[in-house]
Amino acid sequence: MGVFRTCGSILSNVVTLGGASELKHQRGLYEHEYKYYQHIHGLISERKQQIEFDLSALGLSIIDVQLVLVSVEKILTTTYQLNVLQFNKPELLVNQMSMFHSGYSSAFSAGFGGVLGGTAAVGAWGLVSIIGSASTGTAIATLSGAAATNATLAWFGGGALAAGGAGMSGGMMVLGGIVAAPMIFFATKKAYQKAEQLEKATQDLKDSFPELEQLLISASEQQAEVKAYTKQMRTICDNYVFEAKTLMTMIQPNGRWSRLYQWLRRLFRLNVFKPKQQQAIESLAVKTSELLANFNR
């Protein structure tokens, strides 16, 4: 078989006037550069996957906050009326809740232009709302729809999060991923012409390396900072959920039966709450406002 392969190679070179050997040489060079391209591309993809994982984890914590806020809002605005509490800025809390629900709904239902969806989209919205603002200086939590999408993607631009990013291209790379360069194979027909095309493709790969390497640096920086920020904010969100549930249990220890009992006492103009329950309501209002202030910077 080796003899036949050698003869075939010689014949191919004769027929193509040496083009087959040149094509083989250029293919080897291309494959060498392509392996490096694949390596860098793979590292960037790993960073992207980790970012999405951390954003999804934060998104789950924010979803828990949203679910708890539904019950908190009923207690603070529907059943007990904020204006009878000692909490000194009831209108602020009502506005904070409204903005949070609006931003959350936009992120969860619409995602970010198909770049992110579901829990990762909620996490991205939450992270940017908590630690940044749009390029105009407007708090991202106050935006919705396409405006929130564009502001969030722009804020996720290349570079460190603390520095505010470096533009949409970097943000799309990290959140949406990049497309791998195609692996090129040519037959030996018109071998010299194909070899020239392959040589150009090899050079194109080489030319892309500086940008790709910079994207890897940006992705690595963002991945590290997203991990740190999401861990911090998950702790804040999870602690709030735990504290809010504890306080609501103090306010309504028997769930619907407590609500019915309290409604009857109010109907007969009796004191509805014990002093500890009143303190729990006021504490719930303060803790909720403090949490939501993080989303409205």
Image (cartoon, rainbow, N blue to C red):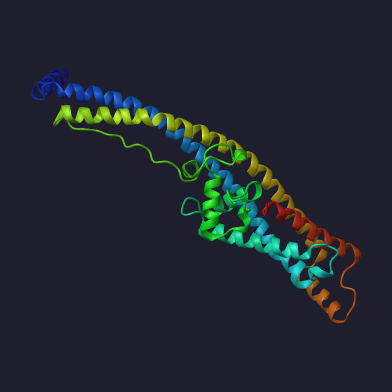
Question: In screen coordinates, is 221 left or right of 172?
Answer: right
Total label count? 0
Q: Is residue 235 above or below residue 75?
A: above
Where is residue 27? Give x, y as percent.
Answer: 26, 26
Where is residue 177? Give x, y as percent.
Answer: 45, 43
Question: In screen coordinates, is 42 left or right of 291?
Answer: left
Q: Is residue 230 above or below residue 3?
A: below
Where is residue 172? Give x, y as percent.
Answer: 47, 45
Residue at (58% x, 61% y) in the render: 105
Residue 207 shows up from this direction:
yes
Q: Is residue 188 above or below residue 93?
A: above
Residue at (67% x, 46% y) in the render: 233
In depth, the one of 297 and 205 nearer the eye is: 297
* Image quadrant containing the N terminus: top left
Where is residue 185? Give x, y as percent.
Answer: 24, 33
Residue at (29% x, 31% y) in the render: 201
Q: Residue furthest front?
A: 136
Residue 40 shows up from this direction:
no
For residue 21, which quarter of the picture? top left
